[in-house]
Image: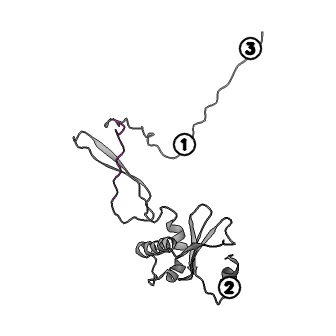
């Protein structure tokens, strides 16, 4: 019968730090209970762009512990067919919708959004043609104001501006409906 022997080598590694390894503390605080219901409260606040969502802890009503409040920040410009990003990107056309203030901020972007909505709601505005750079898009044209608003196939805002019937692209659109 053959015998097998093993030799065990243990290497001691030194990191140069002789302090003892930290010990994970034992949690002795309050127990966390699930909320009975979700409460949504909306109020105006200046949103710091870098700040997304956060959890705020405060003492509960009985003083027996802390109650977490999950805060989700949302931008009212990110609603419906609009996103803040797209409004910001197309703000160069805001002048065509009567927005003379060239500073981009919440107020001017809101005015731009409202003017685009007013254009779409105007009884003079008609759906006419497509935008060649966006498949499935729809162009909403107002012959009185000569403004167009382009919506993507899913209904989201893409862009809008004033048509110049003397310029080549304006002539082509007015003749063919292709923008």
> Farthest front residue?
123
Report helix, strand or loop for mark 3. Answer: loop
Residue 36 in the magenta stretch? The answer is yes
Q: Nearer the viewer, residue 161 or 108?
A: 161
When asked about the image quadrant of residue 51, the answer is: bottom left
- Residue 172 x/y as whole percent: 70, 82
Question: In the rendered structure, which disc, 2 or 3, sits on the residue that comes first in sequence?
Answer: 3
Report helix, strand or loop for mark 1. Answer: loop
- Residue 53 x/y as whole percent: 42, 55
In the image, 163: left or right of 32? right
Q: Nearer the viewer, residue 93 or 60?
A: 93
Question: In the rendered structure, which disc, 1 or 3, sits on the residue that comes first in sequence?
Answer: 3
Looking at the rendered structure, the number of numbered marks drawn on it comes to: 3
Q: Is residue 61 above or below residue 107?
A: above
Residue that carries the numbered disc 3 in the rendered image: 3
> Farthest left residue?
62
Camera-side mark, 2 or 3: 2
Give how far apart the Cα atoms at labels 1 and 2 are: 79 Å
Q: Give the magenta part as a residue range.
A: 31-42
Give how far apart the Cα atoms at labels 2 and 3 are: 97 Å
Q: Residue at x 60, y 60 (%)?
A: 154
Residue that carries the numbered disc 1 in the rendered image: 14
When asked about the image quadrant of residue 33, the answer is: top left
Residue 112 in the magenta stretch? The answer is no
Residue that carries the numbered disc 2 in the rendered image: 171
Location of the C terminus (image quadrant): bottom right
Question: In the rendered structure, which disc, 1 or 2, sits on the residue that comes first in sequence?
Answer: 1
């Amino acid at each position: 019968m053959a015998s097998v022997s093993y030799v065990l080598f243990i290497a001691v590694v030194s990191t140069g730090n002789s302090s003892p390894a930290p010990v994970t503390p034992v949690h002795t605080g309050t127990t966390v209970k699930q909320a009975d219901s979700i409460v949504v409260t909306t109020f105006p606040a200046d949103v710091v762009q870098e700040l997304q969502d956060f959890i705020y802890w405060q003492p509960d009503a009985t003083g027996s512990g802390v109650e977490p409040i999950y805060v989700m920040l949302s931008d009212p410009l990110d609603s419906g067919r609009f996103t803040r990003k797209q409004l910001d990107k197309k703000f160069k056309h805001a002048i065509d919708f009567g927005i003379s203030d060239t500073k981009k901020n919440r107020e001017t972007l809101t005015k731009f959004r409202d003017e685009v909505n007013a254009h779409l709601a105007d009884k003079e505005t008609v759906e006419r043609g497509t935008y060649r750079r966006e498949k499935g898009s729809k162009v909403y044209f107002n012959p009185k104001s000569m403004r167009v608003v382009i919506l993507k196939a899913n209904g989201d805002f893409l862009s809008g501006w004033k048509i110049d019937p003397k310029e080549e692209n304006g002539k082509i659109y007015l003749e063919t409906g292709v923008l």
